[in-house]
Image: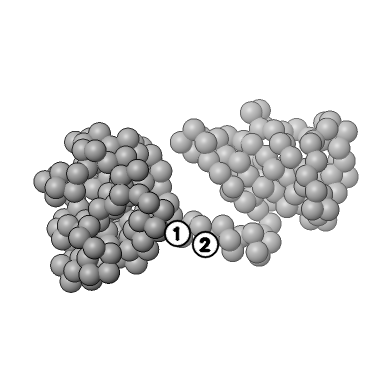
Amino acid sequence: MYVVIIGGGTVGYHLTKELLAAGHEVVVIEEDPARARLIADELGSIVIANDGCEGRYQAEAGMGRADVVAAVTGDDAVNLAASQVAKMRFNVPRAIARVNDPKHDDLFRQLAIDETVSPTRAILGVIEHEIPIHDLLHLAELEGGEVQIVEAQLDAESPVIGRELRELDLPEGSTIALVIRDDRAHSPRSDTRLRAGDKLLAVTSAGDESQLRSLLIGE
């Protein structure tokens, strides 16, 4: 696989090392000449010391034959612009972009970036799993964010404790996909009676999330 990496900072450097170790062909575009020299000294002549947003330097990197472009600088605007040039001008099949500010995630997806990686969201997800919070925990998004997979941790104050699943007035389009009890996953049945300590994995639409939260967690 041929990968072009935009940005030779800490993330880009270690990503390049791992890809090379796995046998892939990699070229890095890094704007800072000193940083580019450092990478070249350590990893070989695989670095172009110039602006990764410029089409001519992407062409020099062989973007036209790249399988993947990964824009991983610390600047969201640079990552977005570089990914757009690679997609629109060179028809790269897959563009992956680092998103430093989670608020920009929707914009990247709307502009045809295939995959976004947010360190902020990743760390937040770990924290949310380690520190129980009385809310819905987002696990994944489908259909561009329109469909949400969420987790609800039920405690003794939850309004659904003691009720069977068939008694719940779920929002239209929402469903309980899995009940996790005593560290074991159970397929939900209509007569499953909910207990404190249960974790529910649910599928819902973005528009119905607040209604589902009120039903399962309370106000």
Most foreground residue, 192 or 217? 192
Q: Amino acid at mark 2?
A: Ile
When asked about the image quadrant of residue 215, the answer is: top right
Q: Residue at x 15, y 44 (%)?
A: 59
Please give the name of the residue rendered at 20% of the width and 60% of the height, measured from the top-left corner: 45
The residue most toward the left is 56
Residue 75 located left or right of residue 101: left
Seen from the viewer's position, the closer of residues 66 and 56 is 66
User: x and y percent of residue 25 in the render?
Assistant: 30, 49
Which residue has dot 2 on it? 123
Decide if residue 100 is in sight here.
no
Residue 32, percent from left and from top = 18, 66
Is there CB contact under 8 Å for labels 1 and 2? yes
Q: Is disc 1 surrounded by few (<14), some (14 to 19) or many (20+) residues within 10 Å?
A: some
Quarter of the image where the N terminus is located: top left
Point 35% across, 49% down: residue: 24
Q: Give the residue number, with chain letter if any, for mark 1.
A: 119
Rendered image quadrant of residue 176: top right
What whole-number distance in Å separates the C-alpha atoms at marks 1 and 2? 6 Å
Q: Secondary structure at mark 1?
A: helix
Q: Is residue 29 left or right of residue 190?
A: left
